[in-house]
Image: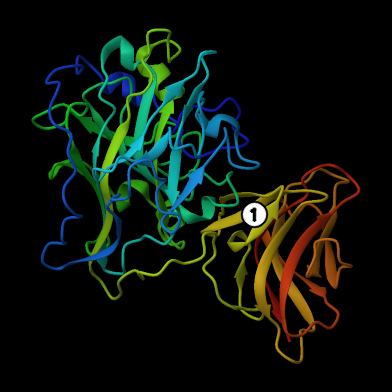
């Protein structure tokens, strides 16, 4: 889910979509009143496929979704992230069972509500796991059986249900979209009998995915309308073919395909070479997508609250490849848990936490951290130095800072305010993507430590980008 931003400096996930105006015609209404029942269980995988993860939403009526499976987002943004979730949506997300709960019949209900003062609330949840990706040489499938909110016409203006996935590096950063990738498995607005499947990638605005539009396809739901009945929405990432493919289905019918060649490098690798994806379910109200389709602000006074999106199940499957994604939950923030070798290359964008940092496409491939200025920092956990410790460190840096602007790249351990154990000065290198490797001495440090890169300057301006760093014995 994703609309056009007010400012391009902080590009969140889910921006959207003049594409919608061309794709939507007279697809509203029809076929109301079908029974909305849940299947008994998550479908068993077909021959050759394995179930990686699932939730059948069989909890007791009025209970929240499983905390071992789902994080409930609240408020109007991630901490430090773009306001209104970067989309212009107007509701506040809550963890109230009035907005999100099991219905006792095998479904999860996400219900937008409006209070007497006209304020909207709704719910948005995301998987604890963030490692869903195609096995090498295999196929990943993300599938859900859902019924969109059963409301159409003027009463539906502003409804924006979605089932989607975001690249794991978005967690804790919130300003590296769309490079980390976004797969919209199912989107819908304003009660139209239409499902959209969209890929977001690369850079914004423009780039290989024509941001802020994305590469999208759409169609009417087969048989019965999207609003009046359950349908099965599926996304496949096929790494068993070359070039790789991304495919979107509704009720088993293919309606949208994007090839690796269409995205190209370095953008394909940026969205596929990280730890994986986490899944999201939400119903937003208003924002750029429904407003753009309606041609005016939504929701309106005629919009009717209280129509839930029903989710029967969500499942992730894999087929083939050299390995199957693990079935145990990893840490919820990238990178995956484990020990970092201080003497191996540490990619700068693989931080565990940051302050004031953006992640962007790098001319040398992959991503770099940027917009670094006085007071910014990045943190890397579990860095193992061994018993002897390093003599120095090397960082791959670039700078397009104006004349007279310079600063220090510093290494600290255990706290961003500890005294630096090493540093080097950097000024203009010929451009923000003109890279050079710069060494800096470090004082003795041993054992397993938390490492901070900190950035200090006497001026308030950005002065450096960092691609990677490592220590040397």
**On the rendered structure, is 261 left or right of 64?**
left
Name the spot of residue 338 as percent of width and height, x first: 56, 76
Q: Which of the two residues, 471 or 92, is positioned nearer the viewer here?
A: 92
Quadrant of residue 74 within the rendered picture: top right
In the image, what residue occupies the spot 34% across and 69% down?
Answer: 325
Instruction: Classify 256 as above or below 294.
Output: below
Residue at the extreme top of the image, as rendered: 301
Q: Which of the two residues, 3 or 38, is positioned nearer the viewer here?
A: 38
Name the spot of residue 251 as percent of width and height, x first: 14, 42
Quadrant of residue 388 within the rendered picture: bottom right
**On the rendered structure, is 217 left or right of 426?**
left
In the rendered image, which quarter contains the N terminus?
top left
Name the spot of residue 456 as percent of width and height, x first: 85, 55
**On the rendered structure, is 344 left or right of 297?**
right
The residue under label 1 is 369
Q: Residue 440, can we see it?
A: yes
In the rendered image, which quarter contains the C terminus?
bottom right
In the image, what residue occupies the spot 29% across and 27% down?
Answer: 149
In the image, what residue occupies the spot 37% across and 27% down?
Answer: 160
Residue at the extreme bottom of the image, as rendered: 387
Name the spot of residue 423 as percent of width and height, x first: 84, 67
Report crowding for label 1: few under 14, some 14 to 19, many 20 or more residues within 10 A (C-alpha). many
Identify the image's colour scheme: rainbow, by chain, secondary structure or one colour. Answer: rainbow
């Amino acid at each position: 889910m994703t609309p056009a931003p007010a400012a391009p400096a902080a590009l969140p996930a889910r921006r959207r979509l003049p594409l919608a105006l061309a794709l939507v015609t007279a697809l509203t209404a029809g076929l109301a009143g079908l029974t909305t029942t849940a299947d008994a269980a998550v479908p068993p995988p077909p021959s050759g496929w394995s179930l990686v993860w699932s939730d059948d939403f069989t909890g007791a009526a009025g209970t929240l979704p499983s905390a071992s499976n789902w994080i409930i987002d609240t408020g109007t943004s991630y901490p430090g992230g773009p306001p209104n979730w970067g989309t212009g949506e107007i509701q506040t997300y809550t963890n109230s069972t009035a907005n999100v709960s099991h219905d006792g019949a095998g479904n999860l209900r996400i219900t937008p509500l409006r209070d007497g003062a006209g304020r909207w609330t709704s719910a948005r949840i995301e998987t604890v796991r963030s490692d869903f990706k195609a096995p090498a040489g295999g196929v990943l499938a993300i599938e859900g059986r859902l019924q969109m909110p059963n409301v159409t016409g003027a009463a539906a203006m502003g409804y924006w249900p979605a089932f989607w996935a975001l690249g794991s590096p978005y967690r804790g950063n919130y300003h590296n979209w769309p490079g980390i990738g976004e797969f919209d498995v199912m989107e819908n607005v304003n009660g139209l009998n239409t499902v959209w499947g969209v890929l977001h990638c690369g850079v914004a605005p423009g780039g290989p995915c024509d941001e802020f539009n994305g590469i999208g396809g759409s169609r009417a739901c087969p048989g019965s309308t999207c609003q009046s009945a359950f349908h099965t929405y599926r996304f496949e990432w096929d790494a068993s073919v070359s070039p790789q493919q991304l495919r979107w289905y509704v009720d088993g019918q293919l309606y949208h395909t994007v090839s690796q060649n269409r995205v190209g490098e370095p953008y394909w690798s940026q969205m596929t070479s990280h730890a994986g994806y986490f899944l999201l379910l939400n119903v937003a109200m208003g924002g750029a997508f429904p407003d753009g389709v309606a041609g005016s602000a939504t929701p309106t006074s005629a919009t009717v609250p209280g129509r839930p999106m029903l989710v029967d199940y969500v499942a992730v499957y894999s087929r083939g490849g050299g390995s199957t994604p693990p079935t145990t939950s990893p840490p919820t923030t990238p990178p995956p848990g484990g020990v970092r070798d201080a003497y191996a290359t540490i990619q700068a964008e693989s931080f565990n936490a940051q302050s004031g940092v953006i992640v962007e496409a790098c001319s040398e491939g992959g991503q770099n951290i940027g917009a670094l200025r006085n007071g910014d920092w990045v943190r890397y956990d579990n860095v193992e130095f061994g018993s002897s410790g390093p003599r120095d460190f090397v960082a791959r840096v670039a700078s397009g800072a104006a004349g007279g602007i310079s600063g220090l790249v510093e290494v600290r351990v255990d706290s961003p305010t500890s005294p630096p154990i090493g540093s080097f000065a950097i000024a203009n290198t010929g451009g923000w993507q003109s890279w050079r490797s710069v060494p800096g001495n470090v004082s003795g440090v041993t054992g397993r430590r938390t490492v901070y890169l900190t950035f200090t300057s006497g001026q308030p301006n950005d002065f450096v980008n960092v691609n990677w760093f490592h220590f040397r014995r």
